[in-house]
Image (cartoon, rainbow, N blue to C red):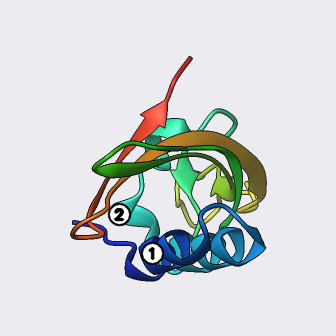
Amino acid sequence: MISFPRTLKAWQSNGFDTEFSHIFKQEIAQFDHQELPLQQGLSLSSYVSNEKISAIINRTEETPDNIIIKSGIFYSGIIAGCSCSDDPTPVDTQNEYCELLINIDKHTAESSIKLITD
């Protein structure tokens, strides 16, 4: 399970502010791409590349038990060729964007993350 301990600590200190936003962006960028539903969010390519991701916060909300973050994720995908020795298709990256809904438990910092598809 993905955990956001530094993000939770920043929220508990000041709520939504510049430090919280900065820490959240750092923390989500450190996760392995496979841990996030980026593959399902592709629209221009077929596989998520290993290039770094960046995030923006579109909205935050607090409930008694959770911090809910709607985040935009900027990342890259690739269109894979057939991998034949004579395949002329270069491996090019495409810029991708998707939105994630991240629900952080205020007691454990564990989170659930789902792709927003609407």
Eyeballing the image, is 117 above or below 103?
above
Give the image location of residue 24, x and y in percent.
58, 71
Image quarter hosting the N terminus = bottom left
Eyeballing the image, is 112 above or below 25?
above
**Residue 31 — which label?**
1
**Residue 35 — which label?**
2
Determine the secondary structure under disc 2: helix
Give the image location of residue 37, x and y in percent.
42, 48
Q: Is residue 86 visible?
A: yes
**Residue 82 — which label?**
none
Image quarter hosting the C terminus = top right
Residue at image position (77%, 59%) is 92
Left or right of 5? Residue 50 is right
Front-lying residue, 62 or 93: 62
Tell me whether the residue at label 2 lies in contact with that at label 1, contact meaning CB atoms closer than 8 angstroms.
yes
Give the image location of residue 86, x and y in percent.
65, 62
Residue at image position (30%, 69%) is 109
Crowd around label 1: few <14 · some 14–19 · many ≥20 (10 Å) = some
Front-lying residue, 47 or 85: 47
Give the image location of residue 8, x and y in percent.
43, 72
Q: CA distance from mark 2 to mark 1?
A: 7 Å
Crowd around label 2: few <14 · some 14–19 · many ≥20 (10 Å) = few
Residue at image position (77%, 72%) is 18
What's the residue type where badge 2 is placed? Glu
What's the residue type where badge 1 is placed? Phe
Q: How many marks?
A: 2
Eyeballing the image, is 99 above or below 27?
above
Determine the secondary structure under disc 1: loop
Left or right of 110? Residue 69 is right
Front-lying residue, 36 or 15: 15
